[in-house]
Image (cartoon, grey):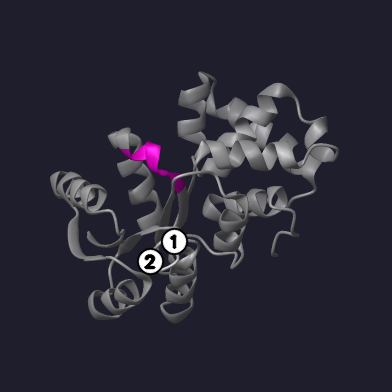
Amino acid sequence: MRVVIAEDNVLLSTGLELLLATKGFEVMAIARDAEAFEDAVAEHRPDVTIVDVRLPPSFRDEGIHAALRARRWYRGLPVLVLSQYVERDYAGELLSDGRGGIGYLLKDRISRVAEFVDALRRVAAGGTAMDPEVVAQLLARRNGDPIDDLTPREREVLARMAQGHDNTTIAQRLSITENAVHKHIGNIFAKLGLAPSDSGHRRVLAVLAYLNGRPPEA
């Protein structure tokens, strides 16, 4: 699986390259700024990209905007964004096009190798991978609406849905049956007014759209 990385920190980018090489990925290019990233995507057409939110020259939001431009030019380009901190607005921008193949993780998550690689593969396959801290902040942000009607278990299931996990993984992580997960998800969608027919990454995007404060797309 071919990867393009946009990261100006040499130590981190080198570490990522070595890590990914041991997991069956091929790093095609490492870009140090947004322009170089866009050029690398155009040249290599990677299967997935890893992009730091903050890139030279201003180290503010060049990375996220380069990722959004690349997804417009190459529809459906999988992008996993890395950030030092939870930046809710940037996460919202990434989710705004309503498609899959997106991820937003804190850089600390890289040290959890299996979790990071699983997230990268999920994004490459067109799924989603949202950092638990981002999801937690989105949940907290929505207090005072139907989220409050969810039971504690339903909130746990909702959080893992928003992170991009399937029913089997949710069941394993919560030590409950898949049938129980299915019932909880039905209750969640009913309480939040979301279409019960959503499946796969579409259901995740519907949940994330709700948590992000915008109407889910039909």
> Which residue occupies the foreground of this view, 168 or 214?
214
For the point 57% across and 49% down, which residue is it? 87
Disc 1: CA contacts within 10 A as few (<14), some (14-19) or many (>=20): few
Q: Give, as a three-letter code, the residue at label 2.
A: Pro
CA gap, disc 1 to disc 2?
5 Å
Q: Is residue 125 visible?
A: no
Residue, disc 2: 56
Disc assigned to residue 175: none
Q: Position of residue 22 (x, y in %)?
A: 14, 44
* Residue 143 within the magenta-colored segment of the rendering: no
Q: Are marks 1 and 2 in contact (CB under 8 Å)?
A: yes
Part of the protein shown in magenta: 105-110
Magenta segment, prevailing SS (helix, strand or loop): helix
* Nearer to us in this view, 7 or 58: 58
Mark 2: give few (<14), some (14-19) or many (20+) Cα within 10 Å. some
Residue assigned mark 1: 59
**Whole-percent x, y for residue 179 in the image:** 58, 28
Residue at left offset 78%, top offset 44%: 192
